[in-house]
Image (spheres, helix red, strand yellow):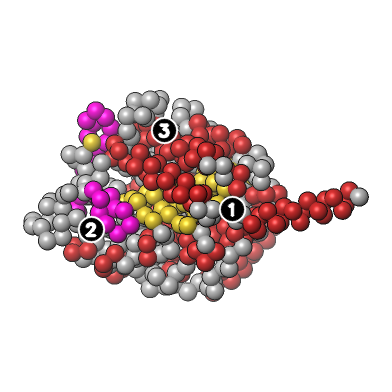
Amino acid sequence: MESSRFAFFSILLLCTCSASPPNFVLIFADDLGYGDLGCYGHPSSLTPTLDRLAAEGLRFTDFYSTCPVCTPSRASLLTGRYQTRSGIYPGVFYPGSIGGLPLNETTIAEVLKPLGYATAIIGKWHLGVGHNGMFLPTKQGFDHFLGIPYSHDMGPCKNLTCFPPDVKCYGLCDIGNVAVPLMENEIIKQQPVNFLDLERSYSDFATNFITTSVEKKQPFFLYYPSHHTHYPQYAGIGAAGRSLRGPYGDSLLEFDNSVGHLVETLERTGVINNTLVFFTSDNGPELMRKSRGGIAGPLKCGKSTTYEGGMREPAIAYWPGTIKPGVTHEMASTLDILPTLAHLAGAELPPVMLDGVDMTDILVKQGKSKRETVMFYPVNPSEDYGLFALRLGKYKAHFYTQGAFHSSTTPDKDCSALRETHDPPLIFDLETDPCELYPLPVDESDIQSVLQQVKTVKEQFESSMVFGESQTAKGKDPNLEPCCNPECSPKPSCCHC
C-alpha cells in the first residue's frame, strides 16, 4: 500500500511539474569577492537578503567562474561554453567594439524560449553592441532589456553623482568615451545614467516583468547581472551611509536590497515555490581599489588572475520546497547553469560542444557533482600557452602563474608578478590549503600519480578545444559608441539626453 501511495504522489508531482515549468532568476554580481558577503564570513557586510537565501538554500564553497574578468565570464555563463570557443577573448568589450557574442552561439534565453518562456535582462550586458545594435540582448533571445550595454565605468564619471546628496563618483572613469547610457531594449532612455535612481528603475522593471508573466501564466527567465560592486560604486538614498563598510558596503547593501525586492515579488505573486533563484559573481575583487574593491577572503589574489581569488566565487541556490538548506563542497561552475536550467525546464540542449554539466543532483539531492575538473584560462588566452591552471578533484596544478594590475596592491608579490612557467606544475591541495601558499613536493609518489592524471586530463581537454575567431581583436570604431543624439557634434561630449 505504501509503495502504491508513493507511486501515486510521484506521478502527481511529475504532472504538476510538467504543467507548471519552473521559473528562473539568475543573479550575477560584478567584481564581488569570495569574502564579501556576510554569509561567506565578512564581519561587517550588511547583506541580509543574500544571507537569508544562503541559510534557507544551498551555499557553494567550490564554485567557479571561467575567467577573471567581466566579458568572457558572461559569455560562458550564458552559453555553457568556455569563452575561447566563442571567441570572447582577450579582455573585454568597449563602447565602440566592433565584435560581440556571435549570433550563432546559443544563450540560456534562446534555450528556454522554444518552451514559451518570457525572457528579460536587467543590468549589465557587456557582450557587445555592434553595428545597429546587432549584439544587444534582444538579438540574443531576450524579450526585454533594461540596462547598460557594457561596464558602467566605460564613460566619464567625474561629474556624476554616485551617492546622495551630491557625492561625486570615485575616480574619473574612461574620459574619452560617450557618457554611459541606460537602454531599454534597443533605445537609449537616458545618457548619462542616473546612478541614484538606477536600482529603483531595475526593481520596478523586474516587478512588472514577473507580475505580467505570472498573470499570463507564462514561465519566465530573469537575468540580473548587477553593476553595483564594480568601480565606481554607487547607492541611492535607501542604502547610502547605512553600512559599516563605507561606499563599497553601501553599494553592496543596495544590491542586496534589489535582490530582496525580487524575492518579495516572487512571494507576492505566489511563484516563490516554483522558482529557482541562483546567485553568483563574474570574477574576483578588484584589489587595486583597496577598500573600495572588495576582498577574496582567505583566497589568493583577485581579479585578472587565475589564482583562487580571481575565479572562485560565492554561489547560492534557493528554491523553497525543492532545495534543502545546506552547504555543498562539490565543484561547480557558471558553465553548469545552462545545462541545469535546460534539464529542469525540459529544454533541448544546443547541438554544440558544451563544457557545462547538469548540477541538478547537487541542487535537489545535495548529491555528487558530475564535474571532476575546472579549467583556468587567463584574461588573454592563446593556443600557444593553453591552460594556465587546472583543478582535478582537490588538487590544483598551475602551469603558469601571473599577477595582474587589478590585484597589484596586496602585500602578496605573486599578485603583481610577471608570468612564470612551472614545469613540473605547482600542485596545491585546495582542501587543506585554499590560500595556495604551500606547493606540494612533486617528488613524492602520490603527487607523481596526481601529476600524471593532470597531464592526461590537460591533453584530452586541449585536444578538444577549438579557439573561435577573437571578437575583441576586431577592434573599435568610435562611430559605434551608443549615442542618443547620433548626429550631434562634437562627440563624445554631445551625447547627452
Which secondary structure, mark 1?
loop
Between 49 and 262, the residue placed more toward the observer is 262
Judge left or right: residue 227 versus residue 376.
left
Judge left or right: residue 336 versus residue 403.
right
Q: Which residue corresponds to mark 1?
A: 22
- 185 falls in the magenta region: yes
Residue at the left extreme, as displayed: 489
Which secondary structure, mark 3?
helix
Between 302 and 84, the residue placed more toward the observer is 84
Which disc number belongs to residue 253? 3
Between 320 and 256, the residue placed more toward the observer is 320
Say what amino acid the circle numbered 1 marks: Pro
Please state the horizontal and vertical placement of residue 227, each as a whole percent of the image.
36, 45
When the figure is inspected, residue 127 is found, relative to residue 104, above or below; the finding is: above
Q: Which comes sooner in the sequence, label 1 or label 2?
A: 1
Residue at 15% x, 60% y: name it: 486
Q: Which residue corresponds to mark 2?
A: 482
Please state the horizontal and vertical placement of residue 426, each as a whole percent of the image.
54, 55
- 228 falls in the magenta region: no
Say what amino acid the circle numbered 2 marks: Pro
